Amino acid sequence: MRRRLVVIAVLGALSSPAFSQSSVTLYGILDAGLNYTVGSQKAIVNGRPVGAGNQLALNDGAFGMFGSRWGLKGTEDLGSGLKAIFTLENGFSMSSGAFAQGGAEFGRQAFVGLDSPYGRLTLGRQYDPHLDIVAPFSAAWQFAGYIATHAADVDNLLSTRRLNNSIKYTMPKFHGVNAEALYSVGGVAGSVSRNQAWSLAVGYDGGPFQFGAGYLTINNPNVSFYGANPNGTGVTGNNLGSLGSATSPANNPAYAGFASANRYNLAGVGASYTYGSATAGVIYTNVRYTGLGDVATSGPNPLGYSGTAAINTVELNLRYFFTPTILVGVMGSLTRVGSVGGHDGASYRQFGGGAHYFLSKATELYALVMYEHATGVDSTGRAAVAAISGLTPSSTSSQTAVRVGIVHRF
C-alpha cells in the first residue's frame, strides 16, 4: 500500500505543470498563382545573355504576395506576468510540396524564449529588427509582394534571409515607441567575430503617422547570411547568386559579384501617413558590401573586386481602400549600385501596382504587375539587365511581370 502511495505522489508531482495555462496554435498561409514574364534569360554565351523568350509558370507564394507556410506557436503562463513562448515555422512550395529556405524543416522561424512585462527575449533562427520595424513601410509588404522588392531583395525587406544562432530582445511598446535588438553568435572557434551579426531598430506608431529606422551589420555574409540555409555552399561557393554560364542564366546579377565581402551593412528608414482610406509611404535603404576580396573567410572573387560596393534605394508607394474589400496600390523605386571595379555601376528603376479583392478575412484574390528598366554595368561586369525579384533575369534592359493569385490563411 505504501509503495502505491509513493508512486501516486511521484506521478502527481510530475504532472503538476499541466495545471498551468498553456496553448499551442497551428497557423499558416497558402499562396499560389500564375506568373507571366515578358523577357527571360536562357544562358550566358560569350559573355552576353541569350534570351529564352516569354514565360508562363505556376509559382508558389515565394514569388507572389506571401511565402506559403505552416507553423506552430505556443505559450505557457509561468505566473507573475512571465510566459514561456516558442515558434516553429516551415516554408514550402505550393507547386511541388518541397521545403523552402534551402531545405530547412523550420527554415522561416525556429525560436524559444520568455515574455514578460519588461520585454521578450528569444533564441534561435529569427528575423532581424530592421526587417521587423522598417520593412512594413515597403510596397512589398503593403500590397505588391516579392516582385516589388529591390534588386532581388538586397535590403532583405521581404525576409528572404534569416539569422541563425541569434539572441533577440523586444521591448514593450511605450507611448507608441517600440524597439528591438539582436545579436547572432558566429560560433567559430578561435574567432569570435567571424560570422557574427547584430542589429538595432526603433519605431513609432503615433496614430496616422508611423516611422521606423534600423541598422544591421553581418560579418562574412556569403556564409553567415546568404549561406545560412542547409543548401549553402560555405566559403567555396557563391551564395549571393550566380554569374551564369553557357547552360544557365545569371542569378541576382545586381550583387552576385560581391560574394567576397568581409561585411554586409544595412541602414534603412521608413515612414507612412494615413488619411482616411489612403496611406502614403516612403522608404530608403543603404547597403554596403565592405572589404571586398576576402576570399579566405567569405567567398569567391572572380572579378578581383576590392574596396566597397554601395547600393542605395528609395521607394515611394501609395495604397487605397476603395471599399473594405477592395485594395489598390502603386509604387515606384530607384536602386543605384555605386561604382566598383573600374566601372560606373548600375541603376534599376521599378514601377508597378497591385489590386486585392478580399473574399473573407481568410481568403483574397490579387493581381500584380511590375516593370523594371536597368542601365549601366552590373556586379557581373556586364551590361546591366532587368531582373525583377524572384524571376529569371531578362536578357535585355527591360522586363515586365504579371501575376494573378489566391491567398488563404488559417
Image: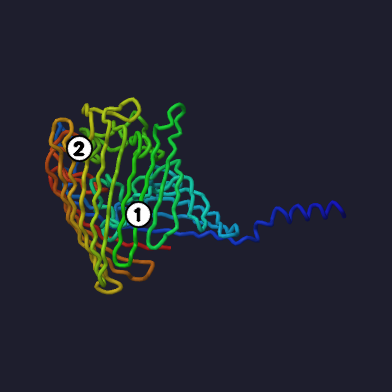
- In contact (CB < 8 Å): disc 1 and disc 2: no
**Which residue appears at 51% of the width and 55% of the height?**
115
**Which residue appears at 45% of the width and 49% of the height?**
169
Which residue is more in the foreground, 207 or 123? 207
Q: Earlier in the sequence, mark 1 or mark 2?
A: 2
**Which residue appears at 27% of the width and 55% of the height?**
270
Amino acid type of the residue that numbered disc 1 sits on in the rendered structure: Ile
Residue 301 position (above or below residue 181)? above
- Please, what secondary structure does the residue beneath circle 1 have? helix
Q: Tell me which corner region of the image, top left, top right, bottom left or bottom right, holds residue 254.
A: top left
Amino acid type of the residue that numbered disc 2 sits on in the rendered structure: Ala
Q: Residues within 10 Å of mark 2 (few under 14, many from 20)?
A: many
Which residue is more in the foreground, 13 or 328? 13
Query: Is residue 343 shown left or right of residue 129?
Result: left
Number of the label disc, if any, that sits on residue 348 = none
**Residue ID for mark 1:** 133
Number of the label disc, if any, that sits on residue 43 = 2
The answer to whether residue 288 is visible is yes
- Please, what secondary structure does the residue beneath circle 2 have? strand
Query: Is residue 116 shown left or right of residue 387?
Result: right
Query: Is residue 227 shown left or right of residue 343?
Result: right
Residue 98 position (above or below residue 140)? above
